[in-house]
Image (cartoon, rainbow, N blue to C red):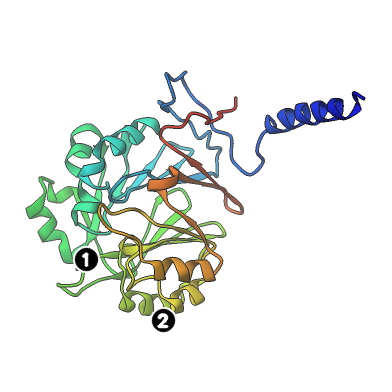
Amino acid sequence: MYRKPLIMFVLFLLMIVISRFPDKINPDLFMTEPTRGNIIKDLDLNLQPGEVAFSFLELSSGESTLIQESSGKNVLINTGSKKAKKQFRQQLEVFQVKKIDALIFTNIGKQYTGNLSWILEHVEVKEILIAEEIKKQFLEQFDVKEENIQSLKENDRLTILNGVTFEVAYIEKREDFNEGGLVLVTEYGNHRFLYMGVASKDADEALIERGTENIELIKVGGFGHYFGTSERLLNHADPQVAVIFKKDSYTISDEVLRRLQEHWAEILLPHDQGIIMMKCNKKDYEITTVPLMTPDLALRS
């Protein structure tokens, strides 16, 4: 008589216990201080020697990526749109960024440089890196000392963090087509990431010609613009993961999404899912998402 209800009750308790087991897929995250409400205040990635974290920031508009290593060095790629200033500022505070060893701009449009003035006022920036083609324009547009700027050329190869290299694989040189837009290939150990600051057929073909293969992650260019992320590039690079940032009042191309899905790439959207964090050593990597505000984010100690 009581056997069936008893079995159901035991199964219910078992499900509760299992749900509390740590998720082996996601890395452990550690808070340095208690938080109020659901807002994350401080986040320590607990990076061990030989580990690097790539964090694609959660922004309502524009794009920005923070790269950190265990020594405390930081590289920032772009600063997002001014419309997302509050989110951008909050996330730099969350990651406890007091100094930026290199600030790289893949473009100088408002979606990429929107919070540069705030950065220069509140964070120590060691150097700024931009394409040589737009250095003069950059100096005219922003209150930055020329000696703090390093201009980049195609095929330049930089090692800013320990073991992490940044290669300038392509620079757009056409004035009316996003002049100075950069494409970076980032390597760490066995990993290769493709950071597209350009969405064009010419950029894709140039990458294919230079043999940009075995890409694990691609940061899609042009906020998912139709003219980028071509079928040929995806066949050549074969990325496992694709990150697409959001541009205010702009919709990601359905055709780009279709191409990525047909190539079995996992599509990640920081504006929708939260901060996309890739934590890796020289052999393996793991990805997790951390929304800025969430009622159920479990942080394990």
Image quadrant in which you'd find residue 181: bottom left
Q: CA distance from mark 2 to mark 1?
A: 20 Å
Q: Left of 127 or right of it: where is 196?
A: right
Rendered image quadrant of residue 88: top left
Depth check: give the residue in front, 75 or 116. 116
Residue lying at 24% horizontally and 39% vertically, measured from the top left:
85
Q: Residue furthest front?
A: 1
Q: Position of residue 274 (x, y in %)?
A: 43, 42
In the structure shown, which secondary structural element does the residue marked by tag 2 occupy? Answer: helix
Q: Residues within 10 Å of mark 2 (few under 14, many from 20)?
A: few
Q: In which quadrant is the N terminus drawn?
A: top right
Q: Residue at x 21, y 50 (%)?
A: 113
- Mark 2 vs 1: CB contact within 8 A: no
Image vertical order of residue 250 relative to residue 198, above or below: above
Front one among 40 and 192: 40
Q: Residue at x 52, y 31 (%)?
A: 297
Residue to which mark 2 is pinned: 209
- In this rendering, position of residue 260 left or right of residue 22: left
Mark 1 burial class by Cα count in 10 Å: few <14, some 14-19, many 20+: many
Question: Is 146 placed above or below 215 here?
Answer: above
